[in-house]
Amino acid sequence: MSYQPEYLPETLDRAAVDAHAGPRVLEFGTNWCGHCRAAQPAIEAVLSDHPDLEHIKVEDGKGRPLGRSFRVKLWPTLIFLRDGEEVARVVRPRDSAEIREALARIT
């Protein structure tokens, strides 16, 4: 995994996400969101131990289809996927423990 410091505009559609084989983490948020910035140390601490895991930071907002397809309402929201299926979700993580627990379900 190469670390992606910023949320980027959507480059995936839901069909591509659903068709992906293996584990993947989608993180929905925005670069200006205070909750997103506050959560980054905990997210990075856990995911840095898994360099081969695909972690995609998706810029979310009104009318963004990928976030809406996952019913994202608060940022950051981390969706933990295995073979295109949602296995776990963490919304506004406060510490690394809940992220680590969700990650254990897909690795």
Image (cartoon, helix red, strand yellow):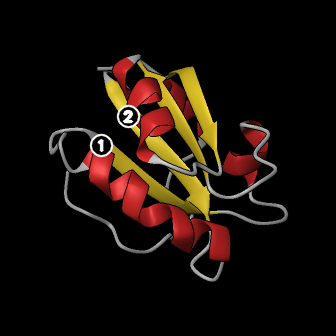
The foreground one among 26 and 18 is 26
Q: Residue at x 41, y 55 (%)?
A: 42
Q: Is residue 83 visible?
A: yes
For label 2, count other residues whose C-alpha is less than 10 Å away and answer few (under 14), some (14-19) or many (20+). Answer: many
Q: Residue 9 vs residue 46: left or right?
A: right
Give the numbered dot on residue 65.
none
The foreground one among 18 and 35 is 35
Place residue 64 in its image quadrant.
bottom right
* Residue at numbered disc 1: 54
Q: Is residue 95 above or below residue 61?
A: above
Q: Residue 71 vs residue 83: left or right?
A: right
Distance (Cα) linking label 2 and label 1: 5 Å
Image spot of residue 73 (x, y percent): 82, 50
Q: Residue at x 54, y 59 (%)?
A: 58
Among the two numbered marks 2 and 1 on one chain, the one whose residue lies closer to the N terminus: 2
* Residue at numbered disc 2: 24
Image spot of residue 77 (x, y percent): 63, 48
Task: Name the residue type under label 2.
Answer: Arg
Q: Is residue 41 above or below residue 15?
A: below
Task: Name the residue type under label 1.
Answer: Glu
For label 1, count other residues whose C-alpha is less than 10 Å away and answer few (under 14), some (14-19) or many (20+). Answer: some
Place residue 10 in its image quadrant.
bottom right
CB atoms of marks 2 and 1 within 8 Å: yes
Q: Residue at x 50, y 34 (%)?
A: 98
The foreground one among 43 and 97 is 97
Q: Residue furthest bottom?
A: 32
Q: Is residue 9 visible?
A: no
SS at circle 1: strand
